[in-house]
Image: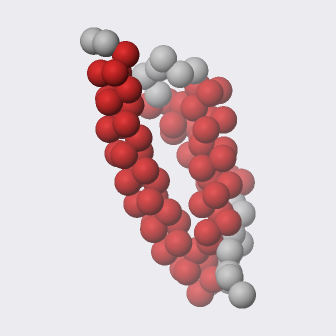
Amino acid sequence: MEIADWRDKIDSLDEQIVQMLNERAAAAIAIGEIKRQNSAPIYEPNRENTVYEHIRAVNPGPLSGAQVQDIYERVIDVMRALQRPRD
């Protein structure tokens, strides 16, 4: 494949990633609503650690487990912000 072909592939993958991130955000917002109804904390370090363990376990590479976790730390930070009440 030529560089233009690889860039087209990346564009297509980016579209899929954006779609999935938005689906994940919708789920996080729904969970935030449930947490508010139950007066549960937004920040759940044990759950976040479980997510990190899971994504490292299912990661086939070439990204290292640490690299995937770095990405997910930012994703989870954004998702946690979505769960906070907005004034």
Horizontal arrangement in the rendering, residue 4 relative to residue 21 (left or right): left
Q: How many marks?
A: 0
Name the quadrant containing residue 80.
bottom right
Residue at image location 41% in from the left, 41% down from the top: 14
One can see residue 50 in this view:
no
Vertical relation: 7 (above or below) 35: above
- Coloring applied to the structure: secondary structure
38 and 68: which is toward the camera: 68
Q: Quadrant of the C terminus?
A: bottom right
Horizontal arrangement in the rendering, residue 20 relative to residue 32 (left or right): left
Residue 15 coordinates in the image, percent (x, y) = 36, 46
Name the quadrant containing residue 86.
bottom right
Horizontal arrangement in the rendering, residue 5 relative to residue 33 (left or right): left
Residue 4 coordinates in the image, percent (x, y) = 34, 21
79 and 37: which is toward the camera: 79
Q: Quadrant of the N terminus?
A: top left
Q: Residue reaching furthest front?
A: 4
Residue 68 coordinates in the image, percent (x, y) = 57, 32
Residue at image location 65% in from the left, 26% down from the top: 66
Residue at image location 67% in from the left, 66% down from the top: 81
Residue at image location 54% in from the left, 79% down from the top: 34
One can see residue 57 in this view:
yes
